[in-house]
Amino acid sequence: GENVGLHLPTLSVQEGDNSIINCAYSNSASDYFIWYKQESGKGPQFIIDIRSNMDKRQGQRVTVLLNKTVKHLSLQIAATQPGDSAVYFCAEITDSSYKLIFGSGTRLLVRP
Amino acid sequence: DADVTQTPRNRITKTGKRIMLECSQTKGHDRMYWYRQDPGLGLRLIYYSFDVKDINKGEISDGYSVSRQAQAKFSLSLESAIPNQTALYFCATSTPRGAGETQYFGPGTRLLVL
């Protein structure tokens, strides 16, 4: 909805450039991570996931990198397009809890 | 995602009223979830259910209750609504772990408590 994104960090990029969105996760026991995209007025949409036994996974125009040493996750979007403008959330899950814990989100703005 | 639907999409209610938000899914998933979203805070888990006989509290269950009427239906109730329950509410579903933990979200319900 339109209130999503208030007070969120914002990344502004030029159309065609690459975007990197970062996330610090909290639980060293988390073993599965997901990136979601949320457009205004819509629910979060799955983008890409990665398990803790991997450090990189690629999708179509997106790459997720995982650094377990510093508990850091990043989402790279290649050749950013206006349709990529949204709020992006990382989420983590721990095998023992089955609960998906969301980060607070980053707003991506793509300049034409 | 049309596979997960929520009703109503928007609701205005008064303090003290009881309201119910409904969620239906056609994905055939066993697991269903209710989240709330506040500006700048991401999504927080209210309740979750792994099947029709299973109900579990999430991070912020106080003031809420749920009912899993069938595999495809999971409703969230606010017994006595208060203004700080004004938020966006999302329902989600997922397959069991091992088959992919991706959660699929509904379009959300915007709730305003006056």
Image (cartoon, helix red, strand yellow):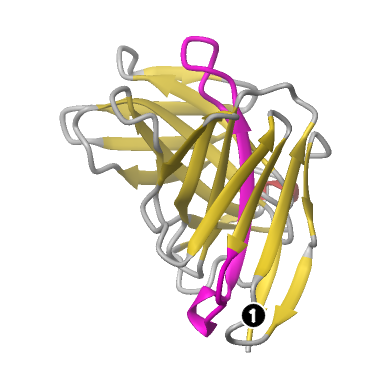
Kindly give the residue lying farthest to the left in the view shown.
Answer: A69
Q: Which one is in front, A60 or B99?
A: B99
- Quadrant where the N terminus of chain B is found in the figure: top right
Q: Which residue is mark 1?
A: B17
Q: Amino acid at mark 1?
A: Lys
What stretch of residues is rendered in magenta?
B78-103
Q: Which one is in front, A76 or B114?
A: B114
Q: Quadrant location of residue B15?
A: bottom right
Q: Quadrant location of residue B28?
A: top right
- Examine the rendered structure and indicate whether residue B93 appears above or below residue B46: above
| Count of number-bearing discs | 1
Image coords of residue B94 (percent x, y): 59, 27
Identity of the residue drawn at 35% across and 45% down? A23
Identity of the residue drawn at 57% across and 50% down? B66
Q: Secondary structure at mark 1?
A: loop
Q: Which one is in front, B11 or A49?
A: B11
Identity of the residue drawn at 39% across and 19% down? A56
Image coords of residue A29 (percent x, y): 21, 28
